[in-house]
Amino acid sequence: MYLTQGLHRSLQQNPDRLAITFKGRRRTFREFADHVARLAAALRGLGMSEGERVGMLALNSDRYLEYVMGVWWGGGVLNPVNTRWSAAEIGYSLDDCDTRILIVDDHFIDMARAVCTLASKAPILIHAGDGAAPAGMLSFDALIAAATPLPDAGRRGDDLACIMYTGGTTGFPKGVMQTHLNMWSSCIMRIAECAPLPDSAVLHAAPFFHAAGLGRALLQFMAGEAHVIIPAFDAGDVLEAIGTQRVSETLLVPTMIQSLLDHPDFARTDLSSLKRLTYGASPIPEALLDRVIRSLPGVELAHSYGMTEACPSISANPPSNHDEAGRRSGLYRSIGRGLPGLMVKVVDVHGEEVPRGMVGEIVVRGPNVMAGYWKKPDETAQAVRGGWLHTGDGAYMDAQGYLYIVDRIKDMIISGGENVYSAEVENVIVRHPAVAACAVIGIPHDIWGEAVHAVIVRKPGATIAEEEVREHCRQAIAGYKCPKSVEFRDRLPLSGAGKVLKREIRAPYWAQKTRSVK
Amino acid sequence: MYLTQGLHRSLQQNPDRLAITFKGRRRTFREFADHVARLAAALRGLGMSEGERVGMLALNSDRYLEYVMGVWWGGGVLNPVNTRWSAAEIGYSLDDCDTRILIVDDHFIDMARAVCTLASKAPILIHAGDGAAPAGMLSFDALIAAATPLPDAGRRGDDLACIMYTGGTTGFPKGVMQTHLNMWSSCIMRIAECAPLPDSAVLHAAPFFHAAGLGRALLQFMAGEAHVIIPAFDAGDVLEAIGTQRVSETLLVPTMIQSLLDHPDFARTDLSSLKRLTYGASPIPEALLDRVIRSLPGVELAHSYGMTEACPSISANPPSNHDEAGRRSGLYRSIGRGLPGLMVKVVDVHGEEVPRGMVGEIVVRGPNVMAGYWKKPDETAQAVRGGWLHTGDGAYMDAQGYLYIVDRIKDMIISGGENVYSAEVENVIVRHPAVAACAVIGIPHDIWGEAVHAVIVRKPGATIAEEEVREHCRQAIAGYKCPKSVEFRDRLPLSGAGKVLKREIRAPYWAQKTRSVK
């Protein structure tokens, strides 16, 4: 009941307010809750018992939120599937937490069938689409239509609410166990940190299978706000939705904001309803901040930082640090301060807090820290030590408690006793006009422990030699941070989500050795 | 660590900000936290083990907040003592939950000694005052000065944080068990409902031994706000504190607001720093609302409703319902809507929700609902049924979810199948110029079940007869609500806190019978 509470509250206060808009379908809270209570009954009828997982493999839609609330209403546990994963990864994650019911939209019918052939026990498939259900699948809409609404199962507190898989790119995916209290507390702390806009309509462009997208949707339910949904991020679709649905707020990553501003429809879209842009995944580049201030006057910018294991929110950098003063002080580059209600600190490898300004790992403690990884006690003990979740993010904290991320801890290079942040070196190298992409890693070195090594992809037709790279770097950063060796490649290995797989680049160098930083 | 978290956060972000002002003593968060960590060590040295109770019998002071945070920092549990109770009641409550350390200020030295002679095992007494400790007592300041700061014990979640005794006027006091999660969630939901004022300094006039006063202090720690403390409510002291300490906010009850406005110093005090008045205990009378709007332009009014068993917050009526429109719509009379993050409803005696506009009992469910009454499983089961805390308050809910209290459930009269709210009848009777005070109760009646009976205290020298009372009532309310019988007395029986003891008035009438409403 913790996580369906926002829906109950909206039903109590504003049953006939518009709750959800998707592709021209509009539902009030009363209509939405009716679907939810029926879906809960249908899932129970298909064998979902209390605490049992139900998966969904789909783009964003109104049905996705019916799945989210319907599973909880019926006492079940979400297992939202990463749509970017391979059939093998999806099959592993479904098997791992024993998900026996999988809801699939039209985009993933073939994938679902492929997953079923791999899974040790094929799940029941439910088709959440507009047309007739394909062979071998039940119809989401027909199940809802035929069901008799159930009362809320009332799960709460430490009851499991969701298993969200992460880390598919680095070994076996791990199922992050998120309880009702975990997700509830993340929402209420975010609301406490930043008051919802009155009568807000929030556009979902981030995928619901991701902790940030789902967390945003839950926060909105708790605040009683309306949801505007598009299947996935597309700059044109976002602009159209804002213009036609009077969207007041949305959550994007900086590159998406960039593509909105670059879109030909930007200038001719009525964006007067937009009041707040929350961004995540990375700080906002200065040039982009300037463009937003110029192009979207009166629109607040806020940074939200978190991770799946924090269910998901950890810190926030408020709108007040994104104005001219924040730009001058550099505060806009911060991921903000820990949310009210939780604790953050920056620690060394022994878990001791480091002095302000010194880089260490961000750790967080609070009611939002995950219950653990599903059936992986060793990985849980590694991630949560003494109650502190270790984020893996290298950062420093200033005198006022603002956090600045410098690198992933595992990508930091320790060379001759000095910390080198791969991200800092990469940011310098990619500014060279001949460089298309680059990854900086540490490779073994007999004297320094690790040496800075750059892997570079040149732009088509461009030329640049090793010594030029070093010279370019020396002009911008200290000598010990400059690459000791440079390697040119045609491409970098990327994950399904587009992340550079540094582990893969590092592997051959470290085959016979052990890194001190894991 | 849940409840010391706000202090840690202030230490991280604003260590040198002014934290507490009391009688000219001013401490920064760093200084305050140093006292807290030393007091924690001193209490451990005196035998306070994890989860063990420490009492405090004192007016408000800076030392009271050191006690609150110091006990938690050391892993202990608060038992804040009601200063209005008799030695017998205090002795019972200390014995009941095995409180072996009691901190006492100068006002309660004699009372503490009296309590010690009654308690089955006399607690260690610590004197929290400015002078030398009296014989047989340790010195609070000396203990702090001699101690070496301890790290935070880090208690959290379902760990017990506080036992707060209630109900001393109606049978044995009951110890309300409040966990870290209970009190933490109440604070964060209140902040989510109503954003703290920036750089706020909040005046504490409500006693810290009461759930409202303590809850307000905790909320301020979580929001990182400064505390201005006076020993107890006194209109002159409140005005002086606001004027000299630049207080931005305070929590009062309506009669206290009235006495501020009536005070001769009101007009000559600089109240320009005051931004918000939160009131509790009862809705604000219309005439007083008008006076506040006129006399304190720009000051927000907000109503906060709760009870000890809800640790303590349940609902809030925001400033927007206290303006001219709220006054016209009558919304200012509401106790507001359930806080975001919890659920409220109005139910009948079977626990079923009643239609909007119909009176029933307010029930609440959420992470803030107490863990139970200490060693009183039967009373706990009676108060919390199916996860729902039964408040004992009779109220109705409007279409938008706003709650309006009409009476305590146990004071409602069921006469001929009609509900009569004693508070409504009393409000009519006391408007008669000859009436000083009045209590309306239900007494047994063979035909109607209960009959409305008024007990009236006349103003000195005034005369009014039974028939006049009835005639006065008939002009204002329906016939079935008017008293069937009237009784005149010299005084009404009052509790230590000044509440009319209706149970005592009712008792002789019901000696041979059983009321259907308990």
Image (cartoon, coloured by chain):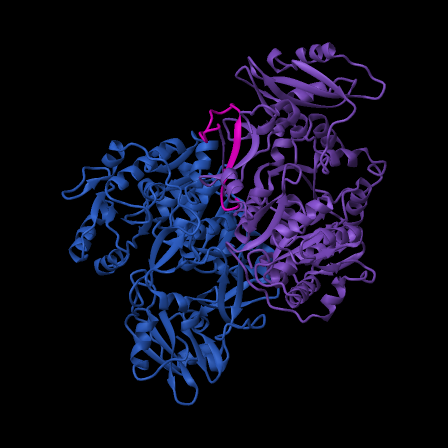
Chain colours: A blue, B purple
Q: Is residue B352 magenta?
A: yes
Q: Is residue A207 left or right of residue B287?
A: left
- Residue sitting at x 51%, y 41%: B378
State whether residue B427 is above or below residue B386: above
Foreground of the two, A15 or B5: B5
In the rendered image, residue A154, in percent from the top left (x then y), is placed at 40, 42
- Residue sitting at x 36%, y 46%: A236
State whether residue A167 is above or below residue B387: below
Residue B83, visible in the rendered structure: no
State whether residue B515 is above or below residue A138: above
In the rendered image, residue A35, in percent from the top left (x then y), is placed at 32, 35
Number of numbered callouts drawn: 0
Foreground of the two, B273 or B145: B145
Q: Is residue B376 magenta?
A: no
Residue pushed farthest left? A135
Q: Quadrant of the C terminus of chain B?
A: top right
In the rendered image, residue B173, in percent from the top left (x then y), is placed at 63, 43
Foreground of the two, B387 or A137: B387
In the rendered image, residue B242, in percent from the top left (x then y), is placed at 77, 45
Q: Is residue B117 left or right of residue A83?
A: right
Residue B51, visible in the rendered structure: yes
Q: Quadrant location of residue A163?
A: bottom left
Residue pushed farthest front? B512
**Residue numbers of the magenta segment:** B348-369
- Residue sitting at x 45%, y 80%: A414
Q: Quadrant location of residue B313?
A: top right
* Dominant SS in magenta: loop
State whether residue B214 is above or below residue A358: above
Q: Is residue B182 left or right of residue A259?
A: right
Q: Quadrant of the N terminus of chain B?
A: bottom right
